[in-house]
């Protein structure tokens, strides 16, 4: 029987602008806070609780995780990584391949176009991926063998435009 892994891909929630400031420091808007809470509730309600989290070091992704984590409850190990900030989908594949063997479910919180690109590579689907969107991808095999077409889209969620 093959090992099964689950990768949860999430784009950060809606962030504001920071005129004259660095993009890295953009913060969530009030809508983004609400989206993050709703995303966490959706994950918890569907029992998509990760064993570990990798999160871009950008302010808006760290804030997204803060609100998602509050809804999931309990301590989940999180690794905040600066290299995820400007990573493309190929870089993400390499980073995810380094996940510890004991991790069965991994949550990645990052940015587009890398997040949507990663889903497209793994599932051959090209999702629309607005702020705070989530894709749950089931994978056969271990993290090291992560490859194009190796995943199945198990579930997805996106906030309502009116939220």
Image (cartoon, rainbow, N blue to C red):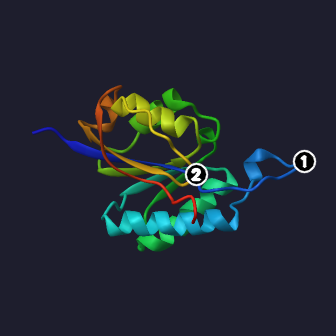
The one of 135 and 71 positioned closer to us in this rendering: 135
Q: Is residue 23 visible?
A: yes
| Mark seen at residue 90 | none
Extreme residue in the front direction: 162
The residue that disc 1 covers is 20
Q: In the image, residue 146 lies at what x, y percent?
A: 34, 31
The residue that disc 2 covers is 131
Residue at the spot 58% in from the left edge and 40% down from the top edge? 112
Image quadrant of residue 34? Answer: bottom right
Tag 2: Cα neighbours inside 10 Å, few (<14), some, or many (≥20)? Answer: some
- Mark 2 element type: loop
Q: Is residue 103 visible?
A: no
- Image position of 85 (left or right of 7): right
- Disc 1, disc 2: CB below 8 Å? no
Extreme residue in the right direction: 20
Image quadrant of residue 46? Answer: bottom left
Residue at the spot 56% in from the left edge and 58% down from the top edge? 161
The image quadrant where one finds the C terminus is bottom right
Between tags 1 and 2, which lies in front? 2
The one of 122 and 76 positioned closer to us in this rendering: 122
Extreme residue in the left direction: 1
- In three-dimensional space, the C-alpha distance between marks 1 and 2, rounded to whole angstroms, equals 22 Å
Who comes first in sequence, dot 1 or dot 2?
Answer: 1
- Image position of 68 (left or right of 121): right
Q: In the image, residue 73 lies at what x, y percent?
A: 42, 74
Q: In the image, residue 91 lies at what x, y percent?
A: 52, 30
Image quadrant of residue 114? Answer: top right
Q: Check the image and report above or below for 12 versus 65.
A: above
Q: In the image, residue 152 lies at what x, y percent?
A: 28, 38
């Amino acid at each position: 029987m093959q090992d099964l892994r689950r990768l949860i891909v999430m784009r950060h929630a809606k962030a504001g602008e920071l005129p004259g400031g660095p993009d890295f420091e953009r913060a969530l808007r009030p809508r983004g806070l609400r989206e993050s809470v709703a995303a966490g509730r959706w994950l918890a309600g569907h029992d998509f609780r990760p064993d570990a989290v990798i999160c871009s070091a950008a302010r808006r992704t760290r804030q997204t995780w803060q609100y998602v984590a509050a809804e999931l409850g309990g301590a989940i190990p999180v690794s905040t990584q600066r290299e995820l900030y400007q990573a493309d989908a190929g870089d993400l594949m390499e980073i995810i391949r380094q996940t510890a063997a004991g991790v069965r479910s991994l949550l990645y919180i990052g940015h587009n176009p890398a997040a949507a690109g990663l889903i497209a590579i793994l599932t051959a689907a090209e999702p629309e991926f607005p702020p705070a969107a989530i894709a749950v991808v089931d994978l056969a095999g271990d993290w090291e063998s992560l490859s194009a077409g190796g995943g199945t889209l198990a579930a997805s969620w996106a906030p309502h435009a009116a939220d």
